[in-house]
Image (cartoon, helix red, strand yellow):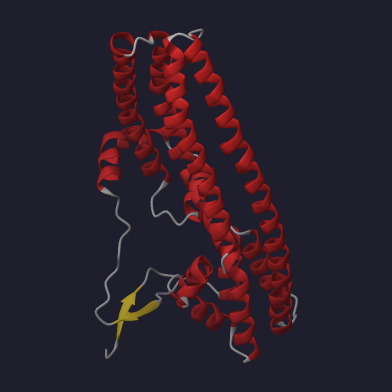
Amino acid sequence: MGAQGLVEDTPFEGRARVVRISKGSRPTYSGLTPLQAIAWRRFRTKYEADGAVDPTLEEDLLKAHMRIGGKEYMAYVMFVTWILVGVGIGIAVVLAVLGLFVLGAGPIMLLFAGVAAVFIPLGGYFGLKSAPAGRAKARGREIDRKITAAMSFISAMASADVNIDTIFRELGKEKIYGEAAEEAAWITRDTELLGVDILTAIKQGAIRTPSRRMQDFLQGVVTTATTGGQLKPYFLIKAEQYENENKLETAKRIETMGLMAETYVTVVVAFPLFLIIMIAIFTVVGTGGGGMSVVLWAIVAGMLPGLQIVFIWMMLIMSKEGAQ
């Protein structure tokens, strides 16, 4: 068969369809990680008996391109949550022992122990359950960040009178466009492997993409093509539109970063310094007891580094969103 192999697909519209793959290629499977596999073996019976899972979770997993089903993912969430229950109880016991027998600050440490025992597993559960939605939103931001450059590529290909299916195929190969190229690659997968026509594949891509801009663009392609419009002028108009929108968003992002810099000075520098001075005075005069020294250490060792990390993370995210 030369450089190509033939694989007969399942019947499609009453006939067998042949899919061409490269010689020597093998199908790949999206396997579970070892922890996910253990979780699925442990909770498989429960989630198979419960039937369908939350459709919103299934949609988020699809938009996030997380190659795992909803039932398997919920089994993984529950398994990790039970592990965190044990971790939270262990940390609570350590804090309680330290507070009662070492530091002499029983009530405060018991409060911290209770918070650890409750919020560690709860935080893990809700954090993992919302992770697909968060990852889908992150993909959407990445697509929005790259779509301006991707539209320039698309408009250039369209100006050379390249077919729409070829445009998406070539865009999917250009990894410099990040998640925008990944969306194009999925559209090509639908047409070349699943036998879907190009307009239906684009319509499906518009439904599953997490990016508002990409969804608007793909829906416009379908509308323009089905109403007899010309795609070349449409691509050029969208490229100019996204370029102008990108300039406005860059200006807004710079203003936001300036506001965050002013907030940093107030929240991370001035307020903690004022609080430390007050608590240090109360500790010296002896009105706060031994617990005030624990609070002081909590501020110095916990609050200050935590605020620094939060602001650094936020600025890092904003700087990445601004990079093209």
Which residue is more in the foreground, 198 or 101?
101
Between residue 314 and residue 172, name the one nearer to us.
314
Residue 226 spot, x, y in % from top left: 71, 75
In this picture, residue 10 sits left or right of residue 310: left
Query: What is the quadrant of residue 202 in the picture?
Result: bottom right
Does residue 53 show up? no
Q: Tell me the quarter of the image containing the C terminus.
A: bottom right
133 up-or-down from 201: above or below: above
Residue occupying image coordinates x 56% and y 59%: 319
In the image, 171 versus 245, the foreground residue is: 245
The residue depicted at 52 percent of the width and 67 percent of the height is 183
Question: Where does residue 169 sit, x and y in percent of width and height?
Answer: 50, 79
Q: Position of residue 54 (x, y in %)?
A: 50, 39
Q: How many marks?
A: 0
Quadrant hosting residue 65: bottom left
**In the rendered view, does 5 fall on the left or right side of 71?**
left
2 versus 167 height, above or below: below
Q: Image quarter for residue 224? A: bottom right
Where is residue 8? Give x, y as percent: 34, 75
123, above or below 61, in the image: above
Is residue 73 in view? Answer: yes
What residue appears at the point 38 percent right and 50 percent down from the top-left corner? 68
Q: Is residue 234 above or below residue 113?
A: below
Looking at this view, is 239 or 172 the one in front?
A: 239
Residue shown at 40% from the left, 28% from the top:
120
Q: Quadrant of the N terminus?
A: bottom left
